Image (cartoon, rainbow, N blue to C red):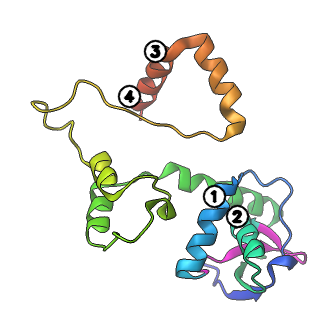
Amino acid sequence: MNKLEIVYLNPCDLTPYENNTRKHAPSDIEGIKKSILADGFNDPIGVWGDNNLIVEGHGRQIAALELGLTEVPCIRLDHLTEEQRKEYAIRHNRSAELSAWDFSKLEEELASLDISGIDMSDLAFDLSQEDLFDSMSDSLVDRAEAPETFTVSFEFQIEEKGKMDEYLKQNGKQGLVNAILEVVDNA
Protein backbone atom coordinates (compact mmCIF):
# COMPACT_ATOMS: atom_id res chain seq x y z
CA MET A 1 0.00 0.00 0.00
CA ASN A 2 1.20 3.46 -0.88
CA LYS A 3 1.89 5.80 2.06
CA LEU A 4 0.21 9.12 1.57
CA GLU A 5 1.86 12.33 2.66
CA ILE A 6 0.17 15.67 2.96
CA VAL A 7 1.81 18.59 1.19
CA TYR A 8 0.61 22.18 1.40
CA LEU A 9 0.17 24.01 -1.90
CA ASN A 10 -1.31 27.29 -3.02
CA PRO A 11 -4.74 26.59 -4.59
CA CYS A 12 -3.71 28.94 -7.42
CA ASP A 13 -0.98 26.42 -8.30
CA LEU A 14 -3.46 23.55 -8.75
CA THR A 15 -4.68 22.73 -12.25
CA PRO A 16 -8.32 21.69 -12.65
CA TYR A 17 -8.75 18.65 -14.88
CA GLU A 18 -10.51 19.82 -18.04
CA ASN A 19 -12.50 16.57 -18.29
CA ASN A 20 -13.61 16.53 -14.66
CA THR A 21 -16.83 14.52 -14.63
CA ARG A 22 -18.23 16.18 -11.51
CA LYS A 23 -20.14 19.48 -11.58
CA HIS A 24 -20.33 21.89 -8.66
CA ALA A 25 -23.27 24.26 -8.37
CA PRO A 26 -22.66 27.58 -6.59
CA SER A 27 -24.67 26.22 -3.64
CA ASP A 28 -22.26 23.25 -3.43
CA ILE A 29 -19.30 25.60 -3.24
CA GLU A 30 -21.04 27.68 -0.56
CA GLY A 31 -21.55 24.52 1.50
CA ILE A 32 -17.88 23.58 1.14
CA LYS A 33 -16.83 27.09 2.17
CA LYS A 34 -19.08 26.96 5.25
CA SER A 35 -17.60 23.59 6.19
CA ILE A 36 -14.05 24.87 5.81
CA LEU A 37 -14.81 27.95 7.90
CA ALA A 38 -16.59 25.93 10.60
CA ASP A 39 -14.33 22.89 10.84
CA GLY A 40 -11.13 23.62 8.93
CA PHE A 41 -9.75 22.19 5.69
CA ASN A 42 -9.87 18.51 6.70
CA ASP A 43 -10.16 16.82 3.31
CA PRO A 44 -6.96 17.12 1.24
CA ILE A 45 -7.14 17.69 -2.50
CA GLY A 46 -5.66 14.86 -4.58
CA VAL A 47 -3.12 16.12 -7.11
CA TRP A 48 -1.04 14.41 -9.80
CA GLY A 49 1.93 15.29 -11.96
CA ASP A 50 4.25 18.25 -12.35
CA ASN A 51 1.40 20.72 -12.94
CA ASN A 52 -0.55 19.56 -9.84
CA LEU A 53 -3.50 18.31 -11.87
CA ILE A 54 -6.51 17.92 -9.59
CA VAL A 55 -7.66 14.30 -9.47
CA GLU A 56 -10.24 14.83 -6.75
CA GLY A 57 -11.18 18.00 -4.93
CA HIS A 58 -12.20 20.47 -7.63
CA GLY A 59 -14.95 21.93 -5.43
CA ARG A 60 -12.54 22.32 -2.52
CA GLN A 61 -10.11 24.19 -4.75
CA ILE A 62 -12.83 26.59 -5.93
CA ALA A 63 -13.95 27.14 -2.32
CA ALA A 64 -10.33 27.76 -1.21
CA LEU A 65 -9.83 30.29 -4.01
CA GLU A 66 -13.07 32.09 -3.13
CA LEU A 67 -12.03 32.16 0.53
CA GLY A 68 -8.64 33.62 -0.43
CA LEU A 69 -6.67 30.75 1.09
CA THR A 70 -3.02 30.68 0.11
CA GLU A 71 -2.31 27.14 1.28
CA VAL A 72 -4.39 23.97 1.25
CA PRO A 73 -3.58 20.38 2.20
CA CYS A 74 -3.01 18.10 -0.77
CA ILE A 75 -2.03 14.49 -1.26
CA ARG A 76 0.24 13.51 -4.13
CA LEU A 77 -1.16 10.76 -6.33
CA ASP A 78 1.91 10.49 -8.57
CA HIS A 79 2.10 6.74 -7.99
CA LEU A 80 -0.90 6.36 -10.33
CA THR A 81 -0.52 5.95 -14.08
CA GLU A 82 -2.57 8.31 -16.24
CA GLU A 83 -5.17 5.60 -16.78
CA GLN A 84 -5.30 4.78 -13.06
CA ARG A 85 -5.68 8.49 -12.29
CA LYS A 86 -8.72 8.73 -14.57
CA GLU A 87 -10.26 5.55 -13.14
CA TYR A 88 -9.64 6.68 -9.56
CA ALA A 89 -11.30 10.06 -10.20
CA ILE A 90 -14.43 8.39 -11.55
CA ARG A 91 -14.48 5.78 -8.77
CA HIS A 92 -13.95 8.44 -6.09
CA ASN A 93 -16.79 10.62 -7.38
CA ARG A 94 -19.16 7.70 -7.87
CA SER A 95 -18.63 6.21 -4.41
CA ALA A 96 -20.36 9.13 -2.68
CA GLU A 97 -23.41 8.69 -4.91
CA LEU A 98 -23.66 4.99 -4.18
CA SER A 99 -23.76 5.35 -0.42
CA ALA A 100 -27.01 6.01 1.41
CA TRP A 101 -27.96 7.60 4.69
CA ASP A 102 -28.75 5.44 7.69
CA PHE A 103 -31.49 7.77 8.88
CA SER A 104 -31.93 6.09 12.27
CA LYS A 105 -28.24 6.65 13.07
CA LEU A 106 -28.33 10.16 11.61
CA GLU A 107 -31.31 10.92 13.83
CA GLU A 108 -29.38 9.61 16.87
CA GLU A 109 -26.31 11.69 15.97
CA LEU A 110 -28.32 14.86 15.45
CA ALA A 111 -30.33 14.24 18.63
CA SER A 112 -27.07 14.00 20.60
CA LEU A 113 -25.97 17.43 19.35
CA ASP A 114 -27.19 20.83 20.43
CA ILE A 115 -28.20 21.97 16.96
CA SER A 116 -30.63 24.64 18.14
CA GLY A 117 -28.27 27.37 16.90
CA ILE A 118 -27.29 25.64 13.67
CA ASP A 119 -28.84 26.55 10.35
CA MET A 120 -29.66 23.08 9.02
CA SER A 121 -28.96 24.30 5.50
CA ASP A 122 -25.31 24.57 6.62
CA LEU A 123 -25.44 20.76 6.86
CA ALA A 124 -27.13 20.63 3.45
CA PHE A 125 -30.50 19.95 5.07
CA ASP A 126 -33.11 22.54 4.21
CA LEU A 127 -35.26 21.69 7.21
CA SER A 128 -35.74 22.60 10.83
CA GLN A 129 -34.64 20.03 13.40
CA GLU A 130 -38.26 18.98 13.94
CA ASP A 131 -38.91 18.62 10.20
CA LEU A 132 -35.68 16.66 9.79
CA PHE A 133 -36.62 14.17 12.50
CA ASP A 134 -40.14 13.87 11.08
CA SER A 135 -38.70 13.14 7.64
CA MET A 136 -36.36 10.50 9.04
CA SER A 137 -38.80 8.66 11.30
CA ASP A 138 -40.05 5.40 9.92
CA SER A 139 -43.77 6.14 10.22
CA LEU A 140 -44.66 3.62 7.53
CA VAL A 141 -43.68 0.70 9.76
CA ASP A 142 -46.76 1.16 11.94
CA ARG A 143 -49.41 0.36 9.32
CA ALA A 144 -52.30 1.13 11.68
CA GLU A 145 -51.31 4.79 11.83
CA ALA A 146 -49.51 5.03 8.51
CA PRO A 147 -50.76 7.54 5.96
CA GLU A 148 -51.97 6.20 2.62
CA THR A 149 -49.46 8.34 0.73
CA PHE A 150 -46.05 9.83 1.27
CA THR A 151 -43.90 12.38 -0.49
CA VAL A 152 -40.60 11.70 -2.22
CA SER A 153 -38.50 14.67 -3.31
CA PHE A 154 -35.77 14.67 -5.91
CA GLU A 155 -33.25 17.36 -6.63
CA PHE A 156 -31.69 17.72 -10.09
CA GLN A 157 -29.09 20.02 -11.54
CA ILE A 158 -30.78 22.74 -13.60
CA GLU A 159 -29.15 21.30 -16.74
CA GLU A 160 -31.28 18.17 -16.30
CA LYS A 161 -34.61 20.05 -16.12
CA GLY A 162 -35.24 19.81 -19.85
CA LYS A 163 -34.71 16.04 -19.81
CA MET A 164 -37.06 15.66 -16.84
CA ASP A 165 -39.72 17.85 -18.45
CA GLU A 166 -39.50 15.78 -21.65
CA TYR A 167 -39.74 12.50 -19.70
CA LEU A 168 -42.82 13.71 -17.82
CA LYS A 169 -44.38 14.95 -21.06
CA GLN A 170 -43.90 11.53 -22.69
CA ASN A 171 -44.62 9.28 -19.70
CA GLY A 172 -46.62 11.37 -17.23
CA LYS A 173 -46.29 11.36 -13.47
CA GLN A 174 -47.44 7.77 -13.19
CA GLY A 175 -44.72 6.72 -15.64
CA LEU A 176 -42.16 8.39 -13.40
CA VAL A 177 -43.61 6.70 -10.31
CA ASN A 178 -43.50 3.32 -12.08
CA ALA A 179 -39.87 3.88 -13.13
CA ILE A 180 -38.89 4.79 -9.57
CA LEU A 181 -40.69 1.75 -8.14
CA GLU A 182 -38.93 -0.48 -10.66
CA VAL A 183 -35.56 0.86 -9.54
CA VAL A 184 -36.49 0.32 -5.90
CA ASP A 185 -37.74 -3.21 -6.59
CA ASN A 186 -34.46 -4.06 -8.33
CA ALA A 187 -32.25 -2.50 -5.64
Q: Secondary structure at mark 2?
A: helix
Q: Indicate the position of residue 172 as horizontal and vertical percent values.
A: 53, 13
Residue shown at 32% from the left, 50% from the top: 131
- The residue labelled by disc 3 is 174
Inter-mark Cα distance, 1 to 4: 31 Å
Q: Secondary structure at mark 1?
A: helix
Q: Is residue 154 above or below residue 149?
A: below
Please report whichever mark, 2 or 3, sits nearer to the chain's N-terminal start.
2
- The residue labelled by disc 2 is 59
User: Does the stretch in magenta take in 46?
Assistant: yes
Inter-mark Cα distance, 3 to 1: 31 Å
> Which stretch is magenta?
41-54
Q: Secondary structure at mark 4?
A: helix
Q: Is residue 77 visible?
A: no
Q: Secondary structure at mark 3?
A: helix
Split into 4 quadrants, where in the image is the N terminus?
bottom right
- The residue labelled by disc 4 is 185
Label of residue 28 in the image? 1
